[in-house]
Image: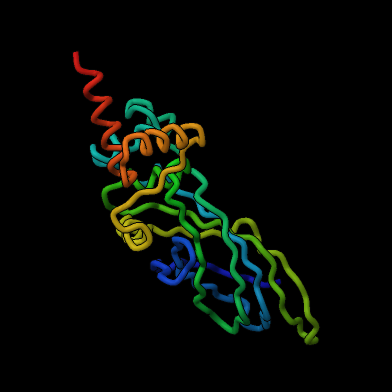
Amino acid sequence: MVELTFAVEGAVVDRYAAAPSLLFKLCVANETPDVRVENVQLHCQIRIEATRRAYAPEDRERLTELFGMTHRWKDTLQSMLWTHTNVQVPALYGARVVELPVPCSFDFNVAATKYFFGLEGGEVPLAFLFSGTVFYRDAGGFLQMDLISWSKETSYRLPVRIWQELMDFYYPNTAWLRIDREVFDAIYRYKRENGFTGWDETLRALLTRQREESLP
């Protein structure tokens, strides 16, 4: 039987990925040194433990779309799934730090994106839940396989500034928004008909028009 422990030691922006990604520094330790671990196929579920931090008034206002009005938070503020990810851990003769890749979306239809964007600062409490397969050598040198217990987990508090740094690096001074195709076609038609050269100009014109039409 192989006993592994896990600890997240930090997180950095992956500046060479094709899409926004964080790299979590994951320390994997073999607590059974008499067993030779050849490889670990590690799966990880990451959850946002939203109830384990305090929220400033400006945070609460920006998170209204996600959790509702503040007086309802005792019922609506809950842990949420962020993502699943995998990593191959090479041979373990003690402890080894590997990079756990986590792709990050800037799609505001995704609950986790709304949560990160809604925070001005502080830290995001995360729970890492592990599963997977361990390949090891027994006393006779034969290759064996063992499953990682579902009870294996660890926690980490991700500084909000790292997520902000990630999005600023991949989308400097911009935001990404997915809309219905019919809505896009209508905005695109308005853009062409009015001779606008950019989307910012088009949307500003629509906002100005809406404000003017709402005046008594």
Q: Is residue 46 visible?
A: yes
Residue 66 showing in the rendered view: no
Q: Quadrant of residue 211?
A: top left
- Name the residue furthest bottom: 141
Q: Is residue 49 above or below residue 194?
A: below
Query: Percent position (x, y) of residue 85?
Result: 57, 60
Percent x, y of residue 22: 44, 64
Q: Residue furthest left?
A: 216
Residue at 59 percent across and 84 percent down: it is 93
- Comparing 67 with 164, the one in front is 164
Q: Is residue 20 left or right of residue 44?
A: left
User: Residue 165 at x, y = what percent?
Assistant: 32, 61
Q: Is residue 35 above or below residue 203?
A: below
Q: Position of residue 80 (x, y in %)?
A: 49, 43
Q: What's the residue at 63%, 82% (across, down)?
A: 91
Q: Residue at x 40, y 48 (%)?
A: 176
Image quadrant for the C terminus?
top left
Which of the pair 90/137 is nearer the observer?
90
Q: How is the image coloured?
A: rainbow
